[in-house]
Amino acid sequence: MLAHKDDYRQRYTVERTFACLGAFRRLLIRWERLAGVYQGFIAFALMVLSVRVAARSNSANSEQGATR
């Protein structure tokens, strides 16, 4: 079976997301006994990552506008 470029692109995005989540120590080792608490920390980490990506794209857009 041949793999397509789109499949690899999507896989790279997923792998990169898991690598970014690994930066949050609390998620590396599951200390919480309750699944809901662990899921809450995952949701919080994803929100933090989303804000970082949005801030990075906003700063890149503002830099492009300043050079024009």
Image (tube, rainbow, N blue to C red):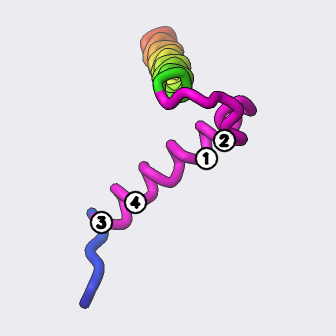
Mark 2–mark 3 CB contact (< 8 Å): no
- Name the spot of residue 52 as percent of width and height, x first: 55, 20
Instruction: Give the distance between the C-alpha atoms of the residues marked 1 and 2, in whole angstroms.
Output: 5 Å
Numbered circle sitting on residue 19: 1
- Name the spot of residue 66 as percent of width and height, x first: 50, 9
Q: Earlier in the sequence, mark 2 or mark 4?
A: 4
SS category of the residue bearing label 1: helix
Q: Earlier in the sequence, mark 1 or mark 4?
A: 4
Q: Residues within 10 Å of mark 2 (few under 14, many from 20)?
A: some
Instruction: Give the distance between the C-alpha atoms of the residues marked 2 and 4, in whole angstroms.
Output: 17 Å
- Name the spot of residue 54 as percent of width and height, x first: 45, 18
Numbered circle sitting on residue 22: 2
Q: Nearer the viewer, residue 36 or 13?
A: 36
Q: Earlier in the sequence, mark 1 or mark 3?
A: 3
Q: Residues within 10 Å of mark 3 (few under 14, many from 20)?
A: few
Instruction: Give the distance between the C-alpha atoms of the residues marked 1 and 3, in whole angstroms.
Output: 18 Å
Quarter residue 38 falls in: top right
Q: Which residue is mark 3?
A: 7
Tag 2: residue type?
A: Gly
SS category of the residue bearing label 3: helix
Instruction: Give the distance between the C-alpha atoms of the residues marked 1 and 4, in whole angstroms.
Output: 12 Å
- Identify the main secondary structure in magenta: helix
Numbered circle sitting on residue 11: 4
Mark 2–mark 4 CB contact (< 8 Å): no
Chain part drawn in magenta: 7-35
Task: Inspect the magenta stretch and tell me whether residue 62 lies in it.
Answer: no
Instruction: Give the distance between the C-alpha atoms of the residues marked 4 and 3, in whole angstroms.
Output: 6 Å
Tag 3: residue type?
A: Asp
Q: Would residue 61 appear left or right of 59 to someone viewing this image?
A: left
Asked if residue 60 shows in the view, the reply is no
